[in-house]
């Protein structure tokens, strides 16, 4: 009983959804699920037969077992459903939304905490690599910006409670809920699909554009809110909106077999870089961001080469792809001319 109470307190801090400044989460004060870099082992029980056949957005009952240590675990009731507009069409095993019940350890005051689970998509080594490469991209974005959705890598045993009763063992990862990120960064979520250019922080937007150019990603757009979320700092003197990118499986760094450049891009393939950020009449943002990206170059390479969950050959290929971007940055005048030739008058 005492252990259950301690776990409850831990997850109460972790998963409550309050948005006032008084509830800002500080990782130096409270333990954080997403600050831990070790692989988390879990078991997930739900109707996988229906999940695969129907890819339904209707929740089904299930439970998750979290292995705190090899000899100790915590079992929590949860509801599961398919998610991801494109991946539901592509994936044999689509991504999962986990919705924790009000009486579970993950919630307090009736708040239904949700977690996005990125799955292996298809049972093959190639698709597992796609998933791991997307996870790596999230880690690279953390090096670039404080406004990043963190992730937690998982070893998952799936147990089918449905008709087929077929079980799976794969890797996956959780994505930090946006409300947790806003707590960490003293900000609030701003809902909407279109914002006038004047209310978007131009430097933050260009930082996203630089990063997406680095990873070869055109599958994002601020104008329509495509694969971006919006937040606004509640600190005094910061009125503009910041865009937060997510969903990177169409990036050239991943080079998934199903990926295609976005319809607004002129790229012929996903591995071809195309700068789809906003056109600027001034160069200050560009020079500042070149400096920022160059400052973390070695950290980027280290993160890639130390990612042992991918084979050395794959890591070297990713290193080479990213190094080509950095080679461009080291000729700033030519780089700025290049992005001016492909930037977009509208997002």
Image (spheres, helix red, strand yellow):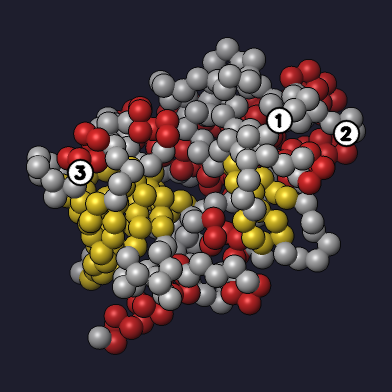
Query: Helix, strand or loop at disc 1?
Result: loop
Q: Are marks 3 and 2 in contact (CB under 8 Å)?
A: no
User: Is residue 239 found left or right of 272 in the rendered image?
Assistant: right
Q: Give the mark nearest the N terminus, 3 or 1.
A: 3
**Within 10 Å of the Cα at label 2, are there few (<14), some (14-19), or many (20+) other Cα atoms?**
few
Residue 347 disc label: 1
Return the x and y of residue 116 as percentages of the image width and height. Answer: 41, 50
Element assignment for label 2: loop
| Residue, disc 3 | 48
Circle 3 or circle 2, nearest the eye: 3
Relative side of 298 to 310, left or right? right
Name the residue: 64% across, 53% down.
190
Question: Which residue shows up at 52% across the image and 75% down it?
Answer: 30
Could you tell me residue 98's position as x and y percent?
A: 35, 54
- How many residues crowd around disc 3 within 10 Å: few (fewer than 14), some, or many (20 or more)? many
Residue at x 29% of width, y 82% of height: 3
Residue 129, compared with residue 345, is above or below; it is below
The residue at which mark 2 appears reads as: 283
């Amino acid at each position: 009983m005492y252990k259950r109470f301690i776990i409850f307190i831990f997850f109460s801090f972790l998963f409550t959804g309050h948005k006032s400044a008084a509830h800002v989460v500080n990782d130096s004060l409270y333990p954080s699920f997403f600050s831990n870099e070790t692989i988390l082992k879990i078991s997930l029980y739900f109707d996988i037969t229906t999940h695969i056949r129907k890819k339904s957005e209707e929740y089904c009952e299930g439970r998750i077992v979290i292995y705190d240590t090899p000899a100790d675990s915590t079992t929590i009731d949860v509801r599961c459903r398919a998610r991801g507009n494109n991946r539901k069409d592509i994936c044999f095993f689509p991504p999962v939304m986990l919705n924790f019940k009000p009486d579970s350890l993950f919630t307090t005051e009736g708040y239904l905490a949700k977690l996005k689970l990125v799955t292996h998509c298809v049972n093959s080594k190639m698709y597992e690599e796609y998933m791991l490469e997307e996870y790596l991209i999230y880690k690279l974005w953390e090096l670039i910006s404080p406004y990043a959705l963190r992730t937690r890598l998982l070893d998952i045993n799936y147990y089918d409670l449905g008709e087929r009763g077929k079980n799976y063992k794969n890797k996956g990862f959780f994505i930090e809920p946006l409300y947790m990120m806003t707590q960490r960064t003293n900000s609030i979520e701003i809902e909407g699909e279109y914002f006038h250019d004047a209310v978007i922080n131009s430097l933050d937007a260009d930082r996203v554009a630089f990063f997406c150019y680095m990873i070869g990603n055109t599958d994002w757009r601020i104008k329509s809110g495509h694969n971006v979320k919006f937040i606004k700092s509640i600190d005094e003197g910061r009125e503009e909106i910041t865009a937060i990118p997510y969903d990177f499986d169409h990036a050239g760094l991943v080079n998934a077999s199903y990926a295609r450049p976005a319809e607004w891009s002129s790229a012929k393939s996903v591995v071809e870089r195309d700068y789809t950020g906003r056109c600027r009449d001034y160069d200050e943002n560009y020079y500042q961001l070149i400096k920022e990206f160059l400052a973390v170059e070695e950290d980027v390479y280290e993160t890639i080469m130390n990612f042992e969950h991918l084979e050395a050959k794959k890591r070297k290929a990713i290193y080479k792809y990213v190094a080509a971007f950095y080679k461009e940055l080291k000729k700033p005048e030519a780089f700025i001319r290049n992005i001016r030739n492909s930037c977009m008058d509208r997002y």
